[in-house]
Image (cartoon, rainbow, N blue to C red):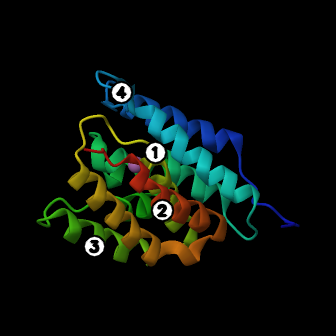
Amino acid sequence: MEINSPAQWSPDIYNKAWNFATLAHQGQFYGGAQEGQKIEYINHIGAVTMEVIWALSLSAGCDGNLAIQCALLHDVVEDTKYNYEDIKQQFGEQVANGVLALTKNEKLSGKEAQIKDSLQRIRLQPKEVWMVKLADRICNLQQPPYYWNNQKIISYQQEAGLIYDALHEANSVLATRLKNKINNYTNFLKKG
Ligand code: NI
């Protein structure tokens, strides 16, 4: 593939959002693949943003700053004390709208209802926001935390299929990468 005009983006805009996300997620951890592992939450944010930057380098016609800011901030409203207004004030309305669409509505009951609602709202946003959700699930299909059982692994794989179906048109390189991660996820099922 030859890209004549890869997306432009600003390191200064990146750093402002990266520093905000680092402080916002400070003290948060998630479980690793091995028993007892605790991983700093910011690892996930860095991984998602890396996927987005990789895709930007292979895709034409994207707003790099929008994609990168939404990637760096994608879990801030869902998982930290900051809200939509805070993001809007610091990063502008377009970024805040993207982050809000990437945030589950916890008033809805059931995980499936929450993910379907979020996917509908993401689909009303620019393609850069769709790319963040594809990148998020690519990262989340790494080896699952050691305490997940097979039922949880299978339902997570099915949920990833919903994300692929809803958003794959946004970006072909991320879509292909997500498809492969979904197919390989059964390798993590525990035997016996
Ligand atoms: Ni995430």
From the image, tell me which residue sits under label 3.
117
Q: Are marks 1 and 4 in contact (CB under 8 Å)?
A: no
Looking at the image, tell me whether mark 1 or mark 4 is earlier in sequence order: 4
Residue 125 placed where, x, y %?
47, 73
Q: Amino acid at mark 1?
A: Gln
Using the numbered discs, state the Cα–Cα distance from disc 1 to disc 4 in whole angstroms: 13 Å
Report the residue marked by disc 1: 142
Residue topped by disc 2:
183
Is tag 3's residue or tag 1's residue first in the polypeptide sequence? 3
Indicate which disc, 3 or 2, sits on the residue closer to the N terminus.
Answer: 3
Residue 151 as seen in the image, left or right of residue 126: left
Q: Secondary structure at mark 3?
A: helix
| Residue type, numbered disc 4 | Gln
Per the image, the residue denoted by label 4 is 34
In the image, what residue type sits under mark 2?
Answer: Asn
Q: Quadrant of residue 114?
A: bottom left
Name the amino acid type tagged 3. Answer: Asp
Per the model, the C-alpha gap separating discs 2 and 4 is: 22 Å
Q: Are marks 1 and 2 in contact (CB under 8 Å)?
A: no
The earlier-in-sequence mark between 1 and 2 is: 1
Give coordinates of residue 32: x percent, y percent: 36, 31
Horizontal side, residue 177 vs residue 100: left or right = right
Contact, CB < 8 Å: mark 3 with mark 2?
no
* SS class, disc 2: helix
- x and y, in percent, of residue 87 in the image: 41, 50
Residue drawn at (32%, 24%) of the image: 27
